[in-house]
Image: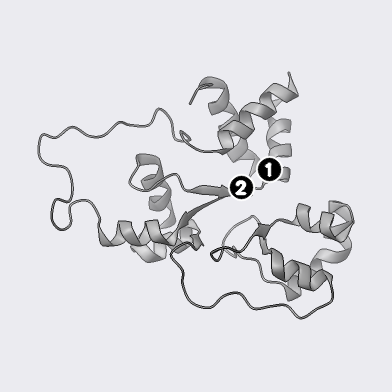
Amino acid sequence: MIPQGRPAVNETEIAQLAGVSLTTWRRQHAPAFRERVPTLLPDSRNRLYDLAQVEAYLAGEPIPALPAGEHPDDLLTARDVAAVLGINTGTVRAYATDGYLSPGVTVHGSRLWSRREVLERRDNAPGRGKGGGRRAGEPQGPRKQHAYEGDPRLDTARQALTAAGGAPRGRIAAALAEQHGGTPRTWERLLTTAATHPNT
């Protein structure tokens, strides 16, 4: 979870703040840093950290605590969402694909949803309460053209394809994963989608 109003940074940005290369950061500084500063998304491959905590660490100051309690604008991971809705993480992603949840927002390659949206979905699920759900015979809403429709990473993938010319997609995907987080395989799927659906 990323607490409301707290900027998150990845290790590329932390290395820049520390004035060293990412390779030097990971080899010489990251192990000690990770012992003292907790990642915001422990269930994600992407290591994201609270900027205020990072700055305190780099300044040699005590690490400030994250805000206590819950806020409607906290950003939740798929695992957080699954816990609130009582489903598994695969179902969370299916909900986002099918429009039952929004696509969420992407922060350094991690897809997140606001607590407000998730609680609204939990408390007002289609089919529950007054006027919930689709009436018999009522047509379904518009379906997405592809799984990544509306995903902001598609724009990044399109720009990378244009800039890379004829470079192999595997190499482009690996570079995007390094820069923005996520896995090369996910970025390969995004690149393929961007190439086959240039306008969505």
- Residue 186 shows in the view: yes
Relative side of 60 to 192, left or right: right
Q: Residue furthest bottom?
A: 62
Mark 2 in CB contact with mark 1 (< 8 angstroms) = yes
- Residue 167 shows in the view: no
Three-letter residue code for mark 2: Gly
Q: Which mark is residue 109?
A: 2
Q: What residue lies at 69% left-to-right and 78% top-to-bottom?
A: 64
Q: What residue lies at 83% left-to-right and 54% top-to-bottom?
A: 16
Relative side of 9 to 69, left or right: right
To which residue does mark 1 refer?
177
Q: Quadrant of residue 26?
A: bottom right
Q: Residue furthest front?
A: 5
Q: Secondary structure at mark 1?
A: helix
Front in this rendered view, residue 143 or 4: 4
**Local crowd at mark 1 within 10 Å, few (<14), some, or many (≥20)?**
many
Three-letter residue code for mark 1: Ala
Q: Earlier in the sequence, mark 2 or mark 1?
A: 2
Give the answer, above or below, for where 37 lies relative to 145: below
Q: Residue furthest left?
A: 136
